[in-house]
Amino acid sequence: LHCALNMETVETNSVSLKRPRSEDDVADADEVKRQKISEKPKTGNDSGQSVETATEQPDKSLLEDVKNEIIPNEESEEQEDEELEDSDEDADPESFADMMKHGLTESDVGITKFVSSHKGFSGILKERYSDFVVHEIGKDGRVSHLDDFSVPVDDEDPSEETFTVLSDEDKQRLEELQLLKNKETSVAIEVIEDTKEKRTVIHQAVKSLFPGLETKTEDRDGKKYIIAYHAAGKKALANPRKHSWPKSRGSYCHFVLYKENKDTMDAINVLSKFLRVKPNIFSYMGTKDKRAITVQEIAVLRITAQRLAHLNKCLMNFKLGNFSYKNHPLKLGELQGNHFTVVLRNITGTDDQIEQAMHSLREIGFINYYGMQRFGTTAVPTYQIGRAILQNNWNEVMDLILKPRPGAEKGYLVKCREEWAKTKDPAAALKKLPVKRCVEGQLLRGLLKYGMKNIISAFGIIPRNNRLMYIHSYQSYVWNNMVSKRIEEYGLKAVPGDLTLKGATAVHIEEGDVENYTIHDVVMPLPGFDVIYPKHKIGEAYKDMLVADNLDINNMRHKIRDYSLSGAYRKIIIRPQNVSWEVVAYDDPRIPLFTTDLDKLEGKPLPVLPTDGKFRALKMEFSLPPSTYATMAIREVLKMDTSIKKQTQLNTTWLR
């Protein structure tokens, strides 16, 4: 394997979460739901949203890179797209706070309440991405850890020589043949030092490293050659050869993926390139945060543990281990949640404040708001586009996505928008856009294909999950606002007319029964055609909010089926499990404050910390169910606004 695809290490951005002096108690929250399918893909700046059944909402970085939305798993686009996405243009710290003044604050998306009474304090979240560690919790309750690099012993596995017998040049030619990149129908590999054993190893190497190719031996001019050719044309690439997989071995190799500063789909795309397979043979239970160290389970169809383990020699920002063979893939949403280890550096709170804040988080919890990453980072929030889709106002949808917008954006996007405003010519605007995979590029391609009179079809070119992201963002916006109203009106106790779940069905809490419930039993609906609403003032407030947006709460079916919202229920307060914390002193902000799974495997010692350091950090651990935002739990502890806009007004030094 040639290791040319080494992962880049991205310089981390830190955010100083300083508390604005004038701010009083505002609000906090996050996301869990049951009863219905909660259709909510992840939203954020690397939006590869998945519409999932009771599935995971990734806890994305508090400050995701301020980028245009990019769809991570379109393999067909040019490599320069990736290079352009990774190069941040025109971003100097002085102007950044100014640019972000057009962004959203928490109150813009309904996040206005807190549940605890302690006084807030400041700290820095994600000063290093290694300060934020996520371990997936599987459906059996086991926390995923990378603690074993060994490969299951299997007589069927090819020898280690398989991986070294082919030269880089041979591999290049075979890859081009496998991917049908040239007109050749076969590749001949001369057998140097000809023996039957040597020929067998070459046959094995070609077949195991390049699924879809077959081999035969030929004599040419007295020399032996192994001839590689296509077994079954293009189809073979998508379906790794079945006949070579032992019947006794499970069809799926499950492994633990440990990754740093990469999102899950990016990691899978890189693995696919190395293994020369399509990304859709991988499965997982949830996508994980990019700006973090994360540990999760992945399954892949008919790729041996031996081949996967071999990748550890080439990959920089991730490692694979804990291999096993099973008969089933993984399914989105099958997890119990995630366990977080978070370091907040340079904290200002007294020991009493910290104790009070963490006790409150453990005993009461936090409001289950949808976090800021749900709503985008630019001057046009995703929920506004979602609202226009639900209103069937397609000119507005096109306008919101393509029109010039103030604030932080890449230079080429600014030029593309200016061209669009000037000419309304999709071809001319596309020429200004070197990166075609962004939503803007896809919509422009659609307009070029279907014409300006058929915006619905043009918009349909955008991958389905990304289109649905917009309407789910609108649902989240309504939910956040309604929960803030509910807490303001009735406080932290269950009241008659609230909703709770009996199994999968929502029922109203009756007057005579209210003593049997607490705030932790209360759910509220995401608006849709298949949910019921509270029987108190908040039920009317839902209706009023949708009326103000020219929507009818009693008719949430859309003439385009994809955009019909059935709705879902979501708990309004989440109480994290396994909460623990400690305050540690440190002098050097670059020193890690705990050891990761990889550190332990490599035998790195625990960091030695001073007893009386210059700075203090709060190290906390907690577990959250799927679809909840860790940033909202942290917000409740610090009592500050987690929006990029607020943080950059307070401190612009993180963008360096």
Image: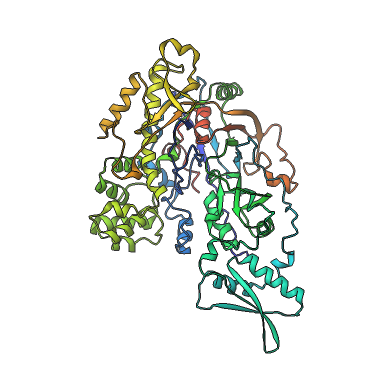
Q: Measured from the top left, where is residue 53 in percent x and y?
A: 47, 39
Q: Residue at x 37, y 34 (%)?
A: 477
- Residue 414 in which image quadrant: bottom left
Q: Nearer the viewer, residue 605 or 243?
A: 243
Any part of residue 323 in sight: yes
**Vertical comparison of 301 with 633: above or below:** below
Q: Front-most of 598 and 235? A: 235
In the displayed structure image, the side of residue 656 where residue 390 appears, left or right: left
Q: Nearer the viewer, residue 328 or 542?
A: 328
Q: Residue furthest bottom?
A: 221
Query: Is 370 in front, or is 177?
Result: 177
Q: Give how far across and how far down residue 12 sits, in percent.
A: 55, 47
Query: Residue 499, image x and y in percent?
Result: 42, 22
Quadrant containing the N terminus is bottom right
Which residue lies at the image location 36% right of the left edge and 60% below the top edge?
Answer: 433
Left or right: 298 as drawn, with respect to 629: right
